[in-house]
Amino acid sequence: MRVVGFGFRRSATLATLAEALERIETRHGPVDRLAAVESMRPLVQALGDARGLATLGVPDASLAKADTLTQSRHSREARGTGSVAEAVALLAAGPGATLLGPRLMSTDRRATAAVATGDTT
């Protein structure tokens, strides 16, 4: 199962997330599900609905539990993790999940996306 996790600014749009998803799929191939922290889930849910993909929610408080490839000072201070997108992807993909690479940023720099493989069913 391939799950894309998103991290994004409140100013991000549906087009921003769609572009980030397209960049991820260009690099890593098709994905099965989308994911976001619960507090930011509605915009990712809209993208999932538009693309026919299920959307998973990850509790905001669990982000610090994931070991991420990227170590952003801003993300660490704001959310307790080096990369929200990477942490969300890992947590949503389930125990033993693996990132396929570091996060990718949207061209407008308002969103990041990362993909993990795991056993989420």
Image (tube, grey):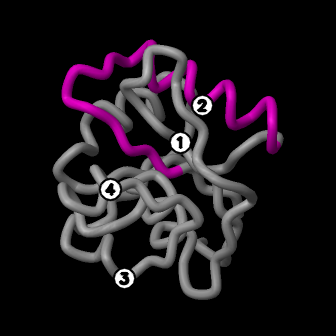
Q: Earlier in the sequence, mark 2 or mark 3?
A: 2
Q: CA distance from mark 1 to mark 4?
A: 17 Å
Residue type at the position of mark 2: Leu
Q: Is residue 51 above or below residue 35?
A: above
Locate the C terminus and report the quarter of the image it occupies.
bottom right
Instruction: Give the residue pinned by disc 3.
Output: 65
Looking at the image, tell me whether mark 1 or mark 4 is earlier in sequence order.
Answer: 4
Q: Which residue is mark 2?
A: 21
Q: Report helix, strand or loop for mark 1.
A: strand
Position above or below: 53 against 95? above
Give me the C-alpha separation between circle 2 and circle 3: 24 Å
> Dot 1: within a 10 Å radius of its alpha carbon, few (fewer than 14), some, or many (20 or more) residues?
many
Q: Which secondary structure dominates the residues rendered in magenta? A: helix
The residue labelled by disc 1 is 113
Identify the secondary structure beneath mark 3.
helix
Amino acid under disc 1: Ala
On residue 73, the disc is 4
Viewer-nearest residue: 77 or 89? 77
Q: What amino acid does circle 3 point to?
A: Lys
Residue shown at the point (69%, 36%) measured from the top left: 24
Residue drawn at x 60%, y 38% is 104
Question: Dot 4: within a 10 Å radius of its alpha carbon, few (fewer than 14), some, or many (20 or more) residues?
Answer: few
Q: Nearer the viewer, mark 2 or mark 3?
A: 3
Residue 78: x and y in percent read 18, 55
- Local packing at callout 3 (Cα closer than 10 Å; few below 14, some 14-19, many 20+) is few
Q: Are marks 2 and 3 in contact (CB under 8 Å)?
A: no
**Residue with the most extreme bottom position:** 95
